[in-house]
Amino acid sequence: MSEKPISPLRQRMLEDMGLRGFTPDTQRDYIRAVKKLAAYLGRSPDTATAEDLRAFQLHLIASGVQPPTINTTVTVLRFFFKVTLDRPETTRHLVFVYEPRKLPRVLSPEEVLHLLEAAPGPKHKAALSVAYGNRGNPPYEEVRHYFFDMGNDSLPAFFEIPKGKEPAGNRNAIGAMQHCAFVVTAERFREVEARLKSHAIDYIGPICTAPRSARHLFL
């Protein structure tokens, strides 16, 4: 049994997608979206007008199609009419719809404990403890946390506060200070503290985020 021949229109669209490196799965999704337009119109999709596309999008919304799918369809149709048909003006009424963002799930204290226990080492436990404990809480609502691996389960951490933003709290609170976390013995830690004091260097600490975790000094 011979395969159904591909129409010149579909062949051109496949070539356009291939030239741009679209994956086979993406190509199938694009073809499927155009076929849905053709089914709605009851005729070839290349005969659609700007008003047809507007009516098609309204039909998708009225049918309960979710925003991500609608926005994907808009992307596909813009590609089809702009690239394959060279008629970009036809899509002038198509618009992306708002996709409501879901609030992130807040972990319970027990779940946070399990998360920290699953961390592979003190370095990761420290990073998770600081990042999860402070992010999103005053005065850290808009603070970004960065951690870098220095080896030996030690890390430097710094925090970026957006320029011009005033958090609803003290910028100098411990959770927003630049700091390093080192894995050292208690004896070695006391030696470091003594050297800081001998040079009149102010610091806050030590802060231990979990048993046997990296010790923090805030300078």
Image (spheres, rainbow, N blue to C red):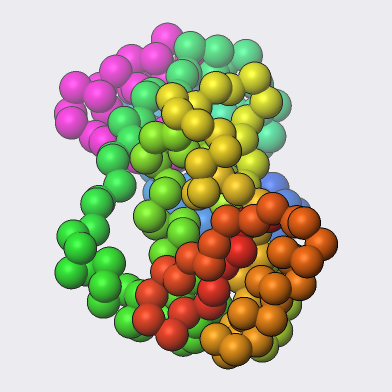
Q: Position of residue 64 (x, y in %)?
A: 18, 31
Residue at 44 percent of width and 34 percent of height:
139
**Would residue 200 appear left or right of 59 to someone viewing this image?**
right
Q: Quadrant of the C terminus?
A: bottom right
- For residue 113, what is the image quadrant? bottom left
Residue located farthest toward the right when viewing the structure as drawn? 199
Of residue 70 and residue 9, the one placed in the foreground of this image is 70
Q: Position of residue 70 (x, y in %)?
A: 36, 33
Residue at 51 percent of width and 48 percent of height:
174
Residues drawn in magenta = 49-72
Q: Is residue 60 visible?
A: yes
Of residue 187 and residue 107, the one placed in the foreground of this image is 187
Q: Position of residue 21 (x, y in %)?
A: 70, 58
Query: How many numbered marks appear?
Result: 0
Residue 93 within the segment the image draws in magenta: no
Residue at 46 percent of width and 19 percent of height:
95
Residue at 49 percent of width and 27 percent of height:
167
Residue 70 within the segment the image draws in magenta: yes
Q: Quadrant of the N terminus?
A: bottom left
Of residue 106 and residue 98, the one placed in the foreground of this image is 106
**Would residue 107 appear left or right of 130 to someone viewing this image?**
left
- Main SS, magenta residues: helix
Give the answer, above or below, for where 145 lies relative to 109: above
Q: Is residue 153 visible?
A: no
Of residue 26 and residue 133, the one placed in the foreground of this image is 133
